[in-house]
Amino acid sequence: MMKVLVTGGAGYIGSHTAVLLIEAGYDIIIFDNFCNASLESIKRVEKIVAQKITTIEGDVRNRDDLHTVFNKHKIDAVIHFAGLKAVGESVEQPLKYYDNNVNGTAVLCEVMAEHGCRSIVFSSSATVYGDPHSTPIDENFPLSATNPYGRSKLFVEEILRDLYISDNRWKVILLRYFNPVGAHASGTIGEDPNGIPNNLMPFIAQTAVGKRDYLSIFGDDYETHDGTGVRDYIHVMNLADGHVKALDKIENFKEVMTINLGTGKGYSVLDMVKAFEKASGKKVPYQIAPRRSGDIAKCFADPSYAKKVLGWEAKKNIEEMCVDSWRWQSNNPDGYN
Ligand code: NAD
Ligand code: UDP
């Protein structure tokens, strides 16, 4: 049985991926410093899979924390979710982002190599495409960044490519996520943002459940079918499954693999509001607000490479995304608290 270290495994995407990894027969260890998660998410995962999960509190920037894990366990591969992800905060505190995301990954890889573990699946993002010249976006589009968060993802991609060039025993898969939403069908785990959500879906869900008065829609004058921003929303369980497929194949790949994980479909903010109202039976009041700085009009994936190389495809539609997100939000109005 392959032993997998899941950094950031207590977080939103990590916890959902943990469920599918265990169901697929992987032996997992969760490593998280709980800066943006709680132990409760892991308890809920344990309930879903009906087994205990080895969980270690530690920081990927801390060599001692990592050595402790690698000394104790023979780890075959790492799925590296641990990182900070708030774009606005990254503009205010760039060094915090470069330290956590870039330095954290460098330290992790160094310790991995010392223990002879050279397989890593990394959480990259569609943000590395910057403002794309057209859609759908394939993996060969030019890369750029408009904020420190995005730049940290770009840097890590480059670092992992350099690592492979220096020693081609490394197995590296860079997964570029589009917009993960939704929750496990049990409604017991989901996205639990700190404070006021930055992202659309949790903001809509909190508005529907009555925690927020109204949604501000950031701009209705974009070049899109209704003027509001278009994104590729992907169900988090489909995204999680992409990681299982990546791990299944990682030993076979002979080069660094860079793969979009998206659905290939773009929905506007207003499309999402309507779909959520239908799924929840609740009104989502909104107001049109100015554009948010750094936002782009349209972003959706060409997901064909993932299908070709991983045999993976995102199958859940926006109704399922909204229904599952609503089940989580309405059963847990205050998240894990
Ligand atoms: P999340 O904040 O829910 O999960 C990240 C987890 O990492 C948290 O549990 C946090 O406590 C942990 N963590 C952070 N820094 C750490 C450190 N130094 N050491 C150990 N643990 C640490 O976020 P998520 O949405 O699950 O995202 C997971 C990954 O996917 C991140 O790298 C993120 O940048 C990337 N990503 C997310 C999205 C998205 O929209 N959610 C999109 C693209 C890429
Ligand atoms: N958005 C919005 N109001 C919000 C949050 C987001 O109108 O409160 C819009 C945003 O402008 C973008 C889309 O929703 O067009 C998705 O934003 P999100 O922050 O979720 O993801 P990203 O910008 O990273 O694609």
Image (cartoon, helix red, strand yellow):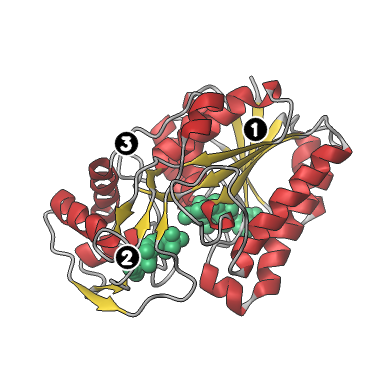
Circle 1 is placed at which residue position?
4
The response on whether ligand 2 sits within 8 Å of label 2 is yes
Quick one: label 2 or label 3, which is nearer the N terminus?
2
Task: Report, in whole angstroms, how far the alpha carbon at label 1 lies from the one at label 2.
Answer: 33 Å
Which quadrant is the N terminus positioned in?
Answer: top right
The residue type indicated by label 1 comes to Val
Residue 88 rendering spot, x and y as whole percentages = 52, 73
Would you say 111 lies left or right of 85 here? Answer: right
Residue 267 rendering spot, x and y as whole percentages = 30, 52
The response on whether ligand 1 sits within 8 Å of label 1 is no
Circle 2 is placed at which residue position?
203
The residue type indicated by label 2 comes to Phe
Quadrant of the rendered structure where residue 238 is? top left
Task: Report, in whole angstroms, how far the alpha carbon at label 1 lies from the one at label 3.
Answer: 26 Å
The residue type indicated by label 3 comes to Lys
How busy is the neighbourhood of tag 1: few (under 14 within 10 Å), some, or many (20 plus)?
A: many
Which quadrant is the C terminus positioned in?
Answer: bottom left
| Residue 178 visible in the displayed image | yes
